Amino acid sequence: MVSPVDLHIHSTFSDGLLTPAEIVEKAISLSMKLIAISDHDSVTGISKANNVANGKIGVVPAIEFNTEVGKENVHILGYGFDIKNQFLNDIIADRQADRVERAKKMVDRLHDIGIKNISYDDIFKLAENGAVGRPHVAKALFLSGNVKSLGYAFEKYLAVGRPAYIARATFTPIQAIHTIHAAGGIAVLAHPGKIGDPIRILNILLNEGLNGIEVYHTDHSKSVTEKMFQRAKSAGLFMTVGSDSHGPMIRNVEIGSVYAPDAVIESIFSCFYSFLM
């Protein structure tokens, strides 16, 4: 069984393995109705996905912003916005520039501790003109024989507190929400079950115009899903469903592998009806 909706998929324009075209073709082959390619700090894949969708499947404009509240990593998903909005694209350009500088500093740190056989060019080639990030540095470490797995690359070098970790430039969920709203979109808290204190974060963001919660997610247990469902229901928030698939061989999470009740699916169809046409 495959869900007809998946609003959280990553492509090669951030840290996924499939191109936007391959994602659309896969979703069509699964008879899905609506998808969103929600790349980190990038909207480049959306128009490419639409070129292939050609009325066979709905593609909702989407993005995922990585933000912080203190030491807490908080991801904000945006949906249904104008991908040509200048303010949004200025913010994206700033975020991508920070990603480039961060990747360069990681490589410099690796060189400083004796790992000399990877370069800036190696990292940016792996990113394929997408939003460069730690997964690309991890992959370069793996391909160059410095680590036995991508996970080990994070564990030994790239995780918080490890030798090559570089913090992102500060970007708050409030900034992300306001950016999404400025482009005419709705803002959704991504995978709250991965946040240490999701209710505290939700209470903060509700006062800043948060529109929804990703209630149904690959990493949510039944108890977390129920807790987020009840919180969304009590606050009148939009509920979304997402696999957070990054392609084959990454955590074995397939497109359309997360399900939601029919009422939630119908609510999503109703919200994004124009993208189904």
Image (cartoon, rainbow, N blue to C red):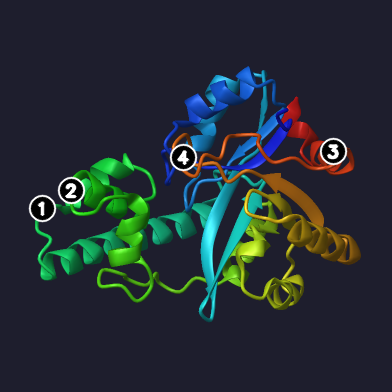
Q: Residue furthest bottom?
A: 70
Pointers 2 and 1 in contact (C-beta within 8 Å): yes
Q: Within the image, what quadrant is residue 16 found in?
A: top left
Q: Residues within 10 Å of mark 2 (few under 14, many from 20)?
A: few
Q: Position of residue 157 (x, y in %)?
A: 28, 65
Q: Quadrant of the N terminus?
A: top right
The residue to which callout 1 is attached is 117
Disc nearest the viewer among 2 and 1: 2
Q: State the separation of the CA atoms marked 2 and 3.
A: 49 Å
Q: State the separation of the CA atoms marked 2 and 1.
A: 9 Å
Report the side of 109 relative to 72 (left or right).
left
Q: Secondary structure at mark 1?
A: loop
The circle on residue 44 is 4
The residue to which callout 3 is attached is 270
Q: Which amino acid, by three-letter code, is at mark 1?
A: Asn
Chain-order first, disc 3 or disc 4: 4
Pointers 2 and 3 in contact (C-beta within 8 Å): no
